[in-house]
Image (cartoon, grey):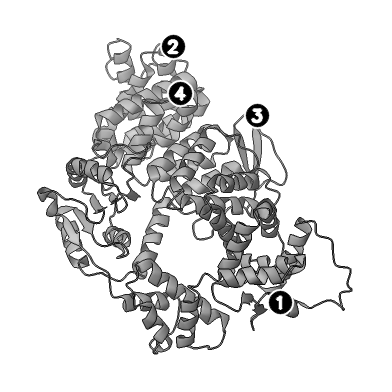
Amino acid sequence: MNDTFTRVENSGGSVHAGQGDIYNYINYTTGHFNQQTAGRSPRRIADDQLRLLRQRFVDPEGMGEARRLLAEHSTVILDGPPGSGRTAAARVLLYELHQGSGIFRELLPGDNEEVALTDAGLVGAGDRLLLDLAEADIQGWAKTRRDLSALRKAVQEQQAHLVVVMPQDGALESDLQLYRAKISHPPAQEVFRRHLRLHHLPHEEFLQPAPAFADFLGDRRSMEEIADFADRVRRARMAHRPPDDFAGWCEQARDARKTWRQEVAGLVAERREASQRALLFTTAMLHGAHADVVHHAAALLLRTLKTPRDNVHLLEGKDLAERLTEVSASAGPDGHVRFNKLGFDAAVRVHFWDHMPDLRPLLSAWADRTVELSDRHLTPDLRRELVQRLADQYLRTGKWRELAALADEWSANATNPARPAAAVHALSCGLESKQYGGNFRGLIYTWCRDKQLAGELAYVLLRACTDVIAPTHPDQAIVRLHHLARRERGATPALDALCGLVATSSRLRRRMLDRLTRHSSAPGADARLFLRICDPVPLTEPGGSPRALMDENYVQGCVTTGWREVFAQLPQPHWQPYARRWLHTASDAGDRHDLLLDLLVDAADRDGTHLAALYSVARAAEPTASGGAARGVATTDRLLQKISAAQGLRPSATPPRPEPPRGTTP
């Protein structure tokens, strides 16, 4: 079995159209797992994420100065204490620019895949760049400061914007002090209330006195801690546990900050029956789920652990309400199961994972089988939460490779549409981890390039690249999508995604043309991809850039090299539709008319067979030219003159109908 894959959409049964593995993608796959991101461009995903951040953001002191510096100098360096929301402020500043061109992206200095900050091709027209160095060491910050001058110059030339988050107490030279904006913690109470409003708490509720919240604010809290406290208030409100008012919710949120470790350890020690512990763990993993889901999942866990069934008659055994009481949980008026103490579920998950390590593989197998359960109460959001809670345990204990292996297993053995969806989210959890995100990006690179694409792994990798990597690290996404696209046969979902991503930025298209032509390690495969990436329309339209890509000498060289490989590697029926589009674009290109034709003729490299084929394509394309057949004929005439010149023939006077070049069969 080789490493290519074929993708068939909406087939009634399995179809194989060539060599390689077969992948059936039915409608349930696309968008089943993450409705918020499926089918949307990475730029839209990034902008939506930034918009949500802006909605819960409260301006810290100094934010106005930061906006002024960014507007006047296209660069601002944010300085502030940890916990003040420096990175969030940087993202909000970039979101507020509302650029018509360019993309938002994070720079990763020191990453092996990132180009140097001094590289002229790093910045695209209108890009919004975040350079987060809040955790940088002395050496890393010193190197970045040396490179900032070149980076700022590129930012200004490209009409882009740059926000740098500097480390606390980091040194800053006098020439950089001009761009420094000092921010401080925003008002904690306003941050808290902003989060509560986003959680849809009526203001008449959270304006009531809450001594527990005042106690919480007794120490200076980071923005993350305040957001977490607000979320616990939301969960306390949903649980409807007494006291059921704002002051009571804040008390529960304050108490939930306890680890509950001793309480959980005591409860597990007291409840020694397998059925009790199974219900305890299931309730923790599916906290907030409907009682039916918890009941079936607990029974599934016992079967997964191969625990003998209790022979007590159903009518004689304990009912679910009694069993839940034994594990300090209950079902609320809405039928959803929760522990009686806020935050208790997280402590239970940690206890089982840390103190029963031999059960980890079985608990993971149970989560896999639970995701596949067919139950109307098991919603996509609940499946996501289950995968998230499992992934949290892997990442918390440094088992990122095991989490990746689990996602691989779910992808390879996709017997149910929920499995690849769970694999996507498992990889997303790893990619979004501050500690292990780089490890997951590196692993996904290796998988896209070399790993056997069994089951639905190709789809899972595609979603990870487009939904998670591309919105913040588009350069890394195009590399991974490129490797996936090389291995496609039949349908081309990875190539489609790659084309969509490069369409968001002229810089990305330039970089992709460079990869396909000047630095290609697989010319045959890349010639096929080149035809899609080298679309003449975006190449000749400047968009928000100062000039069109086609006006750059380097891009012209890439185009010539790419078309030369196309003529050499691919049969005419494959490249003819793309050449026809190229010729039609040339007909409408005005002052670039000759340039587009010259590039095609130069690519043929005086080869009579290639020139003859090009001429025949032009003749066939004449009737479908946008300006009518007469314009198509004029383009063919001009092409013939260039072909004749390339062959060393003297262009003839304008004849009634040009003769074809040597070697041509009209």
Q: Percent position (x, y) of residue 231?
A: 46, 73
Q: Which mark is residue 326?
A: 1
Q: Residue at x 41, y 51 (%)?
A: 471
Q: Percent position (x, y) of residue 247?
A: 45, 87
Count of numbered tags: 4
Question: Does the image show residue 616?
Answer: no
24 left or right, relative to 131? right
Q: Amino acid at mark 3?
A: Gln
Q: Which mark is residue 663?
A: 2
- How far apart, in angstroms, are the residues tagged by discs 4 and 1? 66 Å
Q: Depth check: 471 or 83 in front?
A: 83
Q: Earlier in the sequence, mark 2 or mark 4?
A: 4
Question: Does the image show residue 387?
Answer: yes
Q: Amino acid at mark 4?
A: Pro
Q: Amino acid at mark 2?
A: Gly
- Tell me the crowding category of disc 3: few under 14, some 14 to 19, or many 20 or more residues within 10 angstroms, Cα based: some
Q: Earlier in the sequence, mark 4 or mark 1?
A: 1
Which residue, given by chain and number where applicable, does mark 3 sit on?
Answer: 19
- How far apart, in angstroms, are the residues tagged by discs 4 and 3? 20 Å
Q: Residue at x 17, y 56 (%)?
A: 180
Q: Percent position (x, y) of residue 581?
A: 41, 35
